[in-house]
Image (cartoon, rainbow, N blue to C red):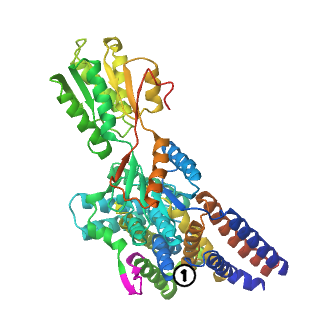
Amino acid sequence: MAHFLRTYGTLLGMVLLVGFFWISLPDTFMTARNWLNISQQVSMLAVVAAVMTVVMVMGDFDLSVGSMASLAGVVAAVMFVQGFGIAAGVAAALAVGLLGGLVNGLLVSLIGILPFVATLATLTMYSGLAFVISGGKTIFGRDIPQGFADFARGGIALGGDKPLVLPYLTLTALAVVALVWLLLEQTSYGRRLYAIGGNMEAARLAGVRVTWLRLTAFGFTGVGAAVAGLMYAARVASANPTQGAGLMLSAIAAVFLGMTMAENGQPRVLASLAGVVVLGVMDNGLTQMQVDSYVREVLVGLIILLAVSISALGRRAVTGR
Amino acid sequence: MALQFTRRAAIMAAGFAALSASMAVAQGEKVALITPYLAQPGTQFYVEAFQARAAELGWEVNVIDTAGDVAAVIARMEDVTTQGVSAIVINVDPAQVGAGLAAAAAANIPVIGMDAGTDPLVRANVTSNGYAMAAETAVYVANRIAGAGNVVMFTFDAFPPVQVRGVVADAVFANFPDIKVLDRITPNVDDGGIADSRAKMEAILAANPEPGSIKAVWAAWDQPALGALQAIEAAGRGGEGIVITGIDANPQARDAIAAGGNFEASVAQDFAGIGRTTADTVARVLAGEVLRQNVVYVPTVLITAANVKDAK
């Protein structure tokens, strides 16, 4: 029973949550349109949570993902202002993401600074750079190419009487999640990351190239944050030096939520995705139920605490402590 | 273990019960007001006035603050569209939430802007008239200096709402043959606009040392006016009767106007009026009226020493 609760408690909670909204909002919640909506709304968070999982697998954090997302959006927008095309802007933003991620990796793996401290410092730096590059202004309007903004509005038509659309943002997020899943679950690279998370010293002694792996994993997270920043910029058809700031805490929350439903409490990317969906469903359902936005935030925090507490209680029951 | 499970079920049940209780009983029209800027003082004035008027109209208002997150504004616009509200009010640049506007339009839900901006998918934007505010202070300056003398202008053409103010002041001053615009300055606003405006004004004062060589300073918003005031006072030229005007009537500007020095006038936007008028505009749209004007202006008030204590 305790084992069941520990493993499936969060899943059960998710089902209850969805059921609750389904009953409360019988006409609007459990519709394909609403779920496609939710999938698009959480797409940016899903990308950040997926790549956050990559570093959290090793027991590390990357606090700079939010400001990296902002910086990437601003870099692309500034490129657009300078007259470069969409491809060049996107490439520049991704390159900045890779570079920023590798800097994090360098600080953490080669210099040996605690990830919390190193990425807290780069959080400030990347955020500051976003302000420097943009001059503190929001870049929008004719400066943003139509094709770039249209990406976030478009999708693959699914038919139906009121035509449904599978949004490109959702597909992008699914692609990133699939890629991270392959990397973490299906390659020896991923298994080595889990080994580092299990016991870094043991992994090192077993011949795992810990320094190199941590460096590249942070690079991965940086690129992912930049992808999310580009998605965000396309969605709002503008770039602002603070717009990605909210992604970081939500992504960490999603990974933690996911950890409560994984065996051994390890971060798993599909579980992180489930955590993202919980957060997205809460926002969507509570908004439709007209729950005050501040009360909503309190409830989201409560749900996270509840899930983590149940997981901890379950573990205690198992170990008999 | 069973105990724990029961406890958890109880917690969940309590949570959901609290949730259900927090849902208002449905009555009248449902209107969603979505803003990323609720924490800003001006926004709170609009929102409170909107809520008060909406309560009179018997509406159920859902105020949603996304705490600076513009993508979340789009998400919440989609959510309330799914929910099927009667109307959506936004307080954000429509250019940034195009996807949300499209969702609302597809569901035939009208969107009204509250100091937002114009867009084909926004039925009307309720705001203050920047042209009129600039005309008020420019004419005040022209009249105070009897239509003759050198005027220093502080403008900021890169920001459209401020650019229109400059255009109107240009036209007013050009209409007086004896008014000469000595300089049209774009201050650096990175520090908030006061310090650099002060430095620029100090340079102009140094270049024009004769008393009476500068008759007035017209600023497109309050910060440069405050900077110019500091420069004039620091240069010991406060007694020359240089007339300074700003726009927005922020608290610092009101203090300066109340002090009775060179800073003589500014223009106050009626934030509460904007909120109230937004609600009335929503009511007109819900009543089926097709709005001819896509911008609804709420009158502003010229603030001088005569009314600074009474005007809100």
The image quarter containing residue A57 is bottom right
Is residue A146 left or right of B176 when viewed as pictured? right
Please give the name of the residue rendered at 32% of the width and 29% of the height, measured from the top-left corner.
Answer: B137
Residue placed furthest toward the left? B177
Specify the amino acid type for callout 1: Leu
The image quarter containing residue B234 is top left
Label 1 residue SS: helix
Image quadrant where one finds the N terminus of chain A: bottom right
**Residue A207 screen position, x and y as percent:** 52, 81
Image quadrant where one finds the C terminus of chain A: bottom right
Judge whether B114 appears above or below B186 on screen.
below
Query: Is A38 contained in the magenta span?
Result: no
Give the labeled residue for mark 1. A270
The range drawn in magenta is A156-169
Q: Residues within 10 Å of mark 1 (few under 14, many from 20)?
A: some
Task: Depth check: give the residue in front, A115 or A288.
Answer: A288
Q: Is residue B90 visible?
A: no
Residue placed furthest toward the right? B3
Task: Depth check: give the residue in front, B34 or B128.
Answer: B128
Please give the name of the residue rendered at 32% of the width and 44% of the height, measured from the top-left corner.
Answer: B161
Task: Depth check: give the residue in front, B49 or A230.
Answer: B49
Please give the name of the residue rendered at 34% of the width and 41% of the height, measured from the top-left corner.
Answer: B129
Disc 1 sits on a residue from what chain?
Answer: A
**Residue A80 screen position, x and y as percent:** 25, 61
Query: Is A168 contained in the magenta span?
Result: yes
Judge whether B279 appears above or below B193 on screen.
below
Judge whether A219 appears above or below B202 on screen.
below
**Residue B72 screen position, x and y as percent:** 48, 63
